Image (spheres, helix red, strand yellow):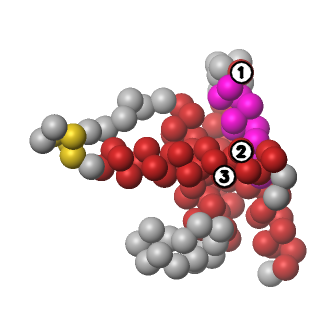
Amino acid sequence: MTDENKNIDEVWKEAAEKEKSASREKDGAEFMPEPDFSFFLSTLAIQAAIFLGDIPNPSTNEPEENLPQAKFIIDTLGVLKEKTVGNLSTEEDSLIDKMLYDLRMKYMAKTKTA
């Protein structure tokens, strides 16, 4: 795994942990994190990774591959990239580029072996 892929995996893990934390109660009230674009991208990337079979499905705790659904989410991230040109911070632009590259490479690897 390249350093770039490790970075993306770490972002996904952080997003998953934020999501878990968001569902926990804080001071007797439901706590939700502040919405931001990077968190939104990360949740989509996590979903794609689940459908690629790289991350266990949280419902079953088992890897479940669904390549058409993975492609749909990867393509959705691509649409977001196209539609937000010129409106992203440097960090957001870099994040979406890295996510798209990593997910597309993983998808291609899966479809070549399928």
Residue 101 part of the magenta-drawn span: yes
Residue 48 included in the magenta stretch of the image:
no
Amino acid at pointer 2: Asn
Q: Earlier in the sequence, mark 1 or mark 2?
A: 2
Q: Is residue 94 left or right of residue 89?
A: right
Q: Nearer the viewer, mark 1 or mark 3?
A: 3
Instruction: Determine whether label 1 and label 2 are within 8 Å by CB.
Output: no
Image marks 1 and 3: residues in contact by CB distance under 8 Å: no
What residue is drawn where x is 41% and y is 48%?
A: 19
**Over which residues does the magenta segment extend?**
91-102
Percent of width and height locating residue 50 = 58, 65
The residue singled out by tag 3 in the image is 9
Which residue lies under the disc numbered 2? 7
Question: Does residue 59 lie above or below 91 as drawn?
Answer: below
Element under disc 2: helix
The quarter of the rendered structure image containing the N terminus is bottom right
Task: Where is residue 41? Give x, y as percent.
Answer: 58, 41
Q: Which class describes the residues within 10 Å of circle 3: few (<14), some (14-19), or many (20+)?
A: some
